Amino acid sequence: MKKIVSLLLVVSIITTMGLNLFALENTEIMKESKLKDTVSSYLPIHKEMVKSTTGHYPDDIVVKKLTDLAGTELELIETGKSGYYIFDPVSGQYIEFSPNAPSPYLNEFGEIKYFGPKSYYVKNDKTFSHTIIEEQKNISEERLFLLQDNFDIMMEESRKNKDYDVLSLMNNTKFEKSALTDTFSTRSYQDIYVPAPSYIWDAAYPANLGESCGYVAACLVLQYWNRRNPSAGVVPSQFLDSSGQLKTTGYTLQDHLLSYGYSESSYGWTIRNVLNDYCDEFNVSATASYSFGKIGVNSQILDGRPVILFGKVPDVQYDHEPIINHAVTAYGIRYGTYVNRYIVHYGWSGYEQVYLGENTWIGGIGTNTRFVLD
């Protein structure tokens, strides 16, 4: 008890001095804007989670409180310049994490809002801005409320799958080191990837134009097959640089896919049509198809084919297009004890390997697009 009181006293003194960080044992670093946000009751659990995904305990650890507009509270764990984990204390799930990607809220210590994967906002005065998408700036709280209903659905679905091991640890008044270590060291999971997954996570690709993530994902899938099966001629040389990677400047493959005249904001059937038009034009022997929800996704990945997943969200920028779609490229599955996860590429630099729970998607997975070489 004396140790706890002493620690709280140190925290109080340092916070009064206006410093942003304080040291804990084992070089843990907690950086927060408010005292009540600085200490996570579940820090030992978070450390074991990080070790289970990286093989070692984090040298630095930052815990921040994430909220939405309805009072939901989650914890964001940052492990230096790379690595982040978003934890739901109700389900015991890490609903989104990556051991390699930078936190979407890195160096942000204000009022930070989370509405599911790829929906990361920070409050600036009276408006909100997306932490990654440059076009989404100065969004009013009223517009941001459009995301809340979808996020509520996502959380309801996500919380149907509880991590009972973690919940059991959380219910203990003491975190015994042996119990923590045993729980995470004995947890079984299996990562299954499509063949040569590095063709996706190491790929060069044209930048997302704001709402063109479906087209970025299509580029990733086409180039994946071009590298995996060079004789199929999936991507013509006009879209490749001297090293065989996709061009990222000038007239790119993404520009050409957009030239077919479909909307920049895409759905599963939009990219299905784009890919089939592309195959017809360049005589690629392949077929694209789409389905609603997760239908066919797992079987495609297990058969060695990446799949494009779409999650529909309200457009917080414009009234004329009330719904837009976030798209990611799924190229692996992590089978776990309680929760299965898709391993996905966000189409953003640095976010090539993110783990999402099967039900962790804004409003649920709306549609998916599959691409099969004949």
Image (tube, grey):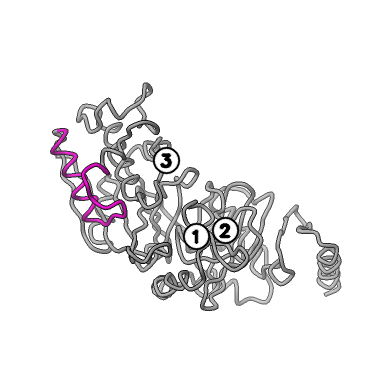
Q: Which residues are magenta?
A: 258-282
Assess whether mark 3 and mark 1 are in contact (beta carbons under 8 angstroms): no
Q: Amino acid at mark 1?
A: Arg
**Real-space Cα distance between discs 1 and 3?**
26 Å
Q: Quadrant of the N terminus?
A: bottom right
Visible in this render: residue 345? no
> Dot 3, crowdedness within 10 Å: few (<14), some or many (≥20)?
many
- Is 267 within the magenta? yes
> Dot 2, crowdedness within 10 Å: few (<14), some or many (≥20)?
many
Q: Quadrant of residue 25?
A: bottom right
Identify the secondary structure beneath mark 1.
loop
Q: Residue at x 71, y 72 (%)?
A: 36
**Real-space Cα distance between discs 2 and 3?**
23 Å
Q: Residue at x 76, y 58 (%)?
A: 20
**Real-space Cα distance between discs 2 and 1?**
11 Å
Q: Position of residue 241 (x, y in %)?
A: 36, 25
Mark number, residue 187 = 1
Mark 1 or 3, which is nearer the eye?
3
- Is 204 within the magenta? no
Identify the secondary structure beneath mark 2.
helix
- Say which residue label 3 marks: 201
- Say which residue label 2 marks: 49
